[in-house]
């Protein structure tokens, strides 16, 4: 197993990409902390994990630092270490610039960017003491190339890329690898309200001729989390079917 006996905290693991990642990691031998703000989805994921491996649900709001530090403490009490952090939690609140409310900006930045900072601070002390660890941040092709109506989201995801590269240099010396994944258009619960016309446009623009599946991203997380990627640090891996070649 590629993650045998590893301990992974995965935020936003109650649905979509996070859930598929949690299940895949469990199949590969990792012990999973399903960190999510939504109890129903988080408990469902944890229940699915227990059929194939080991893990538990922790209700976590990534904007609340005390909850994150408590989750880290609970994880250490239960498993004695933390090997992997997947910063997967995120939201969208799209609007054109002139119509974007300040609260929409603040919500997306606080969850998608500051939330990742909070999570990394919470686990970094443990990883530094261990002399090892892997941190993977969920960016987006929007963070690389922008998108109309997503000023807040693009800013947050671009900020994550900068943070990834800075921390790869800062924490790499401590034995901790920090990388990012930049998904393209992935079919998840977040896309259920997107008009079919828009989805078809994205399919047409993607050289592989389809939209992404959550497992496409989960496998990218798996590779970067595994020892197969032990010399990859500060990278941004696009998982977009060639959308932005």
Image: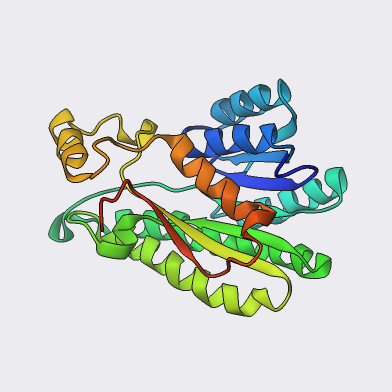
Residue 61 appears anywhere in the view: no
Q: Is residue 130 above or below residue 188?
A: below
Q: Which residue is drawn at the image coordinates 56% and 25% (left, top)?
A: 40
Q: For the N terminus, which image quadrant? A: top right
| Residue 12 percent location from the top left of the image | 53, 42
Q: For the C terminus, which image quadrant? A: bottom left
Q: Which residue is drawn at the image coordinates 17% and 45% (left, top)?
A: 205
| Residue 202 percent location from the top left of the image | 20, 41
Looking at the image, which is closer to me, 121 or 105? 121
Q: How is the image coloured?
A: rainbow
The quarter holding residue 204 reads top left
Q: Which residue is drawn at the image coordinates 59% and 31% (left, top)?
A: 42
| Residue 83 percent location from the top left of the image | 74, 54
**Number of marks drawn:** 0
Q: Is residue 212 left or right of residue 229?
A: left
| Residue 189 percent location from the top left of the image | 38, 31
Looking at the image, which is closer to me, 7 or 212? 212
Name the outermost residue toward the top: 51
The quarter holding residue 196 reads top left
Q: Is residue 6 left or right of residue 63?
A: right
Q: Is residue 52 above or below residue 131?
A: above
Residue 5 appears anywhere in the view: yes
Q: Which residue is drawn at the image coordinates 59% and 79% (left, top)?
A: 169
């Amino acid at each position: 197993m590629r993650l045998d006996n590893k301990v992974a905290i995965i935020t936003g693991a109650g649905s979509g990409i996070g859930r598929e990642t949690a299940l895949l990691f469990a199949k590969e031998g990792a012990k999973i902390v399903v960190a999510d703000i939504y109890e129903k989805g988080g408990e469902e994921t944890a229940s699915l994990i227990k059929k194939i491996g080991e893990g538990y649900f922790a209700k976590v709001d990534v904007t609340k630092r005390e909850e994150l530090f408590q989750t880290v403490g609970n994880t250490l009490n239960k498993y004695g270490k933390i090997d992997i952090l997947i910063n997967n939690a995120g939201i969208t609140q799209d609007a054109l610039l002139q119509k974007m409310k300040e609260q929409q900006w603040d919500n997306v930045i606080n969850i998608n960017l500051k939330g990742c900072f909070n999570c990394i601070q919470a686990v970094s002390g443990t990883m530094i003491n261990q002399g090892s660890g892997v941190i993977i941040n969920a960016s987006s092709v929007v963070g690389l190339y922008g998108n109309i109506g997503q000023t807040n989201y693009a800013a947050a995801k671009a900020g994550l890329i900068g943070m990834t590269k800075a921390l790869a240099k800062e924490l790499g010396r401590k034995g901790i690898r920090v990388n990012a994944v930049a998904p393209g258009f992935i079919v998840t619960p977040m896309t259920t309200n997107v008009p079919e016309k828009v989805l078809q446009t994205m399919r047409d623009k993607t050289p592989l001729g389809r939209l992404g599946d959550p497992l496409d991203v989960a496998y990218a997380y798996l590779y970067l989390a595994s020892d197969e990627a032990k010399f990859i640090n500060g990278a941004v891996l696009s998982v977009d079917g060639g959308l932005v070649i």
